[in-house]
C-alpha cells in the first residue's frame, strides 16, 4: 500500500518531507522505520500500533506508483501496464491545477464552502489557522489553510428564500451592484453552519443585523456576498498573522462565475484575484500530475508552467477598498464576538429543545472570575460555567511583580491553554496585571486567549506605549481591553479609546490582587463618565466592572452603564451558578 505524502502531511499530521525518504536497508532502526510519523502523538494517545497499520511507503504527488494490473485494467476498461501516478486530496490537487506552488500564493477553492490554502516557506503554526503542513502539497514547500463552512450555500439559501429559483444568479447580482458597499447599514454573518477559522465554533450561526423596512432583497443579497468576503479576509488575516503572507489570490469554483463577487473578494481582502483559463482546478491538477508520472514533463513545476494559463486579473478598486476596510474593522469583526453568548444560548432551541436558562438581561451579562473558583477542580468549574450558559470567563493573570506580592501569582499562558482545552466555545478574557505586559501578547495568543486586557498603570501612564501594545494585541488576533485602578482618572485613557484598538474598559471596583474585597462606590462615577463619553463620541466599548460585584452592588453598577459584571467569590459561593448570576441580573427564576 502506498500513501500520498500530501495527504499524510495535511490529514495525518506526518512530516511530508521525511516520510518520502526511502530506506531500503532491512536493519534500519525504529526511528527510520517510522520516519516522518508523529510517534509522540500516537504514544500520548495510547495508539502506537497505529504506525504499523498505516502505509509504510509514501510518495509525493506526481511520482510513479507503478503500472495498472490486469484485473484493474479490465475493470476500468484501460490498457494493462498503464503508468499510475500518485495523487492526493482533491482540494490540494486543485492547488496544483491553479499553479499555486510558490510561496505567497493563496489558492481559494470556492463552492458551498470556501477553502484558503497559502503556500509558505515557513512550516510554523498559530491559533486561528490549520497547518502549516511540511512538504505539502509538494516536497520543498509547505502550506497553511483556513476555511469557511457556509459561503456559496448561503447564497443558494437566499435565492430559494426569495422565491427566485427561476431567476439567474446574474439578475440578482445586477440588482445588488446598484447598492453601495455596506448595504445601507445592513451587515451579515455568514457562519450559518458554524465557524471553521479563525475562530473554531460549531455553535456559531448566521445573522442579519441592521435590517430596516427600507432594505430590499438586493440589500440582503449583497450583504450575504459581502459577509462571505469579510469572512475570507478574516481567514487571510489570521494566516498572515501566523507568518504566512500572500500577495495574490488564485481562485477556482462557483465564485468565478460572478464578476461582482470576484471584485468584492479583491476589494475586501485588498489582494489581486487571479482567474485561470481552466477553472476546474482539481481536474487540471490531476492532468498535471499524470503528465509528470508519464514522463511528459520532468517536474510538477515544469508541467504547471506549460499547462496553467491566467485568463484574468481582478485588481482591488482603490475607491472601494477604504469603505470595506472601515466596515470590516469597525463592524464585521465586532459583530461575531458580541453576539456569541446569545447565539450559544439560542443554539439549544434548535429542533424544539427544552430551552436554556439565560444568564443575560437587557444586554448585561455575567462573567465568572476564575480567580475565585476551586483551583483544584478548575476543569469542572469551567464546565459548570458552560452548563450555566456563562461563556465569558474572566482570568486574572498576576505575576507577583507588578503587585509586588508573592501571593499575587496566578495564571500564566500554560494555564490559559489548559483552560482553552476544556472548551473551545468560551470567551477567555485574560486580565494582565503584570510587569512588562508586552511580553505576554504572543504566548497568550497561542494559548487561546480571546481578549487581552492590560493594566493602564503597568504602562507608566504612557499613551504611546499603550497604543503600541493595543495594536500588537489586535495584530495577534485577539480583542484588546484596558483596565484602570479605582484611583486612576478616566481622562487618562480616553485618547487610547479614540484609536479604535480597544473595545472594552475594565474598571476595577476593588484594588487588584485578591478576591473578596468590599466594593469602592467612587468607581460608579468612572463608569458613568466613560458611558457618557462613548455615547457622545459614538465610540462603542464594553464597560466591565471587575471586583466587589454582588447582589447588593449589581443594580448600581448596571445603572452606571456596566454591561459586563465580573464576579468571583459571590458567584462561586452559590451551589447553582445560574441562580447566583440571575440574582445579579434581577431575573426571576
Image (spheres, rainbow, N blue to C red):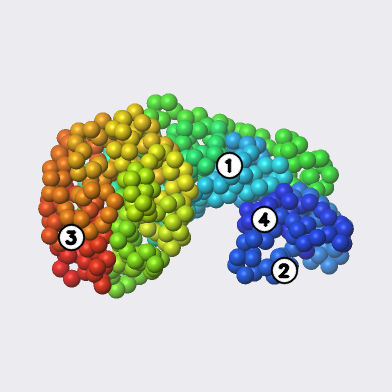
Q: Is residue 304 above or below residue 127?
A: above
Which residue lies at the image location 46% right of the left edge and 36% below the top edge? 269
Q: In this orientation, does residue 544 appear? A: no
Pointer 3 local density, CA inside 10 Å: few below 14, some 14–19, many at least 20: many
Which of discs 4 and 3 lies nearer the camera? The answer is: 3
Total residue callouts:
4
Q: Which residue is mark 3?
A: 550
Per the image, the residue denoted by label 2 is 53
Classed neighbour count for the residue bearing mark 1: other residues with Cα under 10 Å, few (<14), some (14–19), many (≥20)? many
Frontmost of labels 3 and 1 is: 3
Q: Along the polypeptide, which appears first: circle 4 or circle 2?
A: 4
Check disc 1 and report the residue beneath it: 118
Task: Give the SS element for disc 4.
Answer: loop
Disc nearer the start of the sequence (4/3): 4
Q: Secondary structure at mark 2?
A: helix
In this rendering, does residue 415 appear at all?
Answer: yes
The alpha-carbon separation of the residues under discs 1 and 4 comes to 19 Å
Residue matched to label 4 = 14
Q: Are marks 4 and 2 in contact (CB under 8 Å)?
A: no
Of residues 368 and 214, the one nearer the viewer is 368
Q: CA distance from mark 4 to mark 2?
A: 14 Å
Q: Label 3 to label 2, Cα distance in Å? A: 57 Å
Q: Give residue 406's position: percent from left, percent from top.
A: 36, 51
Which mark is in front, 1 or 2? 2
Extreme residue in the top direction: 318
Name the one closer to the observer, 346 or 512.
512
Instruction: Please provide percent x and percent y for residue 377.
Output: 39, 68
Measured in 3D between alpha carbons, the distance from the residue under mark 4 to the one under mark 3, in whole angstroms, is 52 Å
Residue shown at 24% from the left, 68% from the top:
573
Q: Is residue 353 above or below residue 242?
A: below
Residue 468 vs residue 190, the one in the foreground: 468
Amino acid at each position: 500500500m502506498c500513501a500520498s505524502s500530501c495527504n499524510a502531511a495535511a490529514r495525518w499530521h506526518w512530516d511530508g518531507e521525511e516520510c518520502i525518504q526511502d530506506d531500503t536497508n532491512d536493519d534500519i532502526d525504529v526511528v527510520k522505520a517510522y520516519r516522518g510519523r508523529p510517534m509522540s502523538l500516537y504514544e500520548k494517545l495510547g495508539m502506537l500500533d497505529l504506525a504499523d497499520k498505516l502505509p509504510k511507503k509514501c510518495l509525493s504527488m506526481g511520482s510513479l506508483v507503478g503500472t495498472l494490473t490486469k484485473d484493474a485494467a479490465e475493470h476500468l476498461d484501460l490498457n494493462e501496464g498503464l503508468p499510475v501516478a500518485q495523487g492526493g486530496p482533491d482540494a490540494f490537487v486543485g492547488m496544483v491545477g491553479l499553479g499555486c506552488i510558490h510561496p505567497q500564493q493563496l489558492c481559494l477553492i470556492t463552492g458551498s464552502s470556501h477553502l484558503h490554502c497559502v503556500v509558505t516557506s515557513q512550516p510554523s503554526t498559530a491559533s486561528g489557522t490549520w497547518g502549516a503542513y511540511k512538504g505539502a502539497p509538494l516536497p520543498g514547500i509547505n502550506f497553511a489553510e483556513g476555511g469557511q463552512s457556509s459561503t456559496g450555500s448561503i447564497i443558494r439559501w437566499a435565492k430559494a428564500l426569495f422565491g427566485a429559483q427561476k431567476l439567474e444568479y446574474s439578475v440578482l447580482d445586477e440588482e445588488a451592484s446598484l447598492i453601495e458597499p455596506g448595504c445601507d447599514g445592513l451587515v451579515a454573518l455568514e457562519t450559518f453552519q458554524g465557524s471553521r477559522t479563525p475562530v473554531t465554533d460549531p455553535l456559531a450561526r448566521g445573522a442579519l443585523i441592521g435590517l430596516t423596512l427600507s432594505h430590499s432583497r438586493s440589500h440582503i443579497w449583497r450583504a450575504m456576498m459581502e459577509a462571505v468576503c469579510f469572512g475570507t479576509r478574516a481567514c487571510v488575516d489570521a494566516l498572515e498573522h501566523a507568518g504566512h503572507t500572500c500577495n495574490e489570490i488564485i481562485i477556482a469554483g462557483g465564485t468565478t462565475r460572478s464578476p461582482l463577487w470576484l471584485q468584492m473578494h479583491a476589494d475586501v481582502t485588498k489582494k489581486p484575484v487571479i482567474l485561470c483559463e481552466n477553472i476546474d482546478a482539481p481536474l487540471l491538477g490531476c492532468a498535471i500530475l499524470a503528465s509528470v508520472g508519464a514522463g511528459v514533463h520532468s517536474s510538477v513545476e515544469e508541467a504547471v508552467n506549460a499547462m496553467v494559463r491566467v485568463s484574468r486579473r481582478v485588481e482591488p478598486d482603490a475607491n472601494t477598498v477604504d469603505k470595506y476596510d472601515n466596515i470590516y474593522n469597525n463592524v464585521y469583526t465586532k459583530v461575531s464576538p458580541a453576539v456569541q453568548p446569545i447565539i450559544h444560548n439560542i443554539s439549544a432551541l434548535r429542533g424544539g429543545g427544552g430551552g436554556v436558562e439565560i444568564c443575560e438581561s437587557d444586554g448585561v451579562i455575567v462573567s465568572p472570575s476564575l480567580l475565585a473558583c476551586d483551583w483544584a477542580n478548575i476543569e469542572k468549574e469551567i464546565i459548570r460555567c458552560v452548563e450555566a450558559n456563562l461563556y465569558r470567563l474572566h482570568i486574572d493573570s498576576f505575576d507577583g511583580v507588578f503587585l509586588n506580592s508573592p501571593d499575587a501569582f496566578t495564571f500564566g499562558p500554560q494555564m490559559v491553554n489548559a483552560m482553552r482545552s476544556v472548551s473551545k466555545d468560551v470567551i477567555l478574557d485574560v486580565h494582565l496585571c503584570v510587569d512588562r505586559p508586552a511580553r505576554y501578547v504572543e504566548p497568550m495568543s497561542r494559548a487561546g486567549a480571546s481578549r487581552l486586557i492590560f493594566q493602564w498603570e503597568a504602562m507608566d501612564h504612557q499613551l504611546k506605549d499603550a497604543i503600541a501594545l493595543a495594536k500588537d494585541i489586535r495584530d495577534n488576533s485577539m480583542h484588546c481591553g484596558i483596565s484602570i485602578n479605582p484611583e486612576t482618572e478616566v481622562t487618562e485613557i480616553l485618547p487610547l479609546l479614540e484609536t479604535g484598538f480597544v473595545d472594552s474598559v475594565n474598571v476595577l471596583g476593588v484594588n487588584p490582587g485578591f478576591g473578596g474585597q468590599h466594593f469602592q462606590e467612587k468607581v460608579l462615577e468612572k463608569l458613568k463618565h466613560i458611558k457618557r463619553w462613548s455615547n457622545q463620541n459614538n465610540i462603542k466599548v464594553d464597560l466591565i466592572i471587575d471586583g466587589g460585584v454582588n447582589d447588593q452592588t449589581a443594580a448600581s453598577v448596571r445603572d452606571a452603564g456596566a454591561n459586563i459584571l465580573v464576579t468571583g467569590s459571590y458567584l462561586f459561593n452559590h451551589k447553582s451558578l445560574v441562580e447566583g448570576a440571575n440574582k445579579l441580573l434581577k431575573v426571576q427564576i
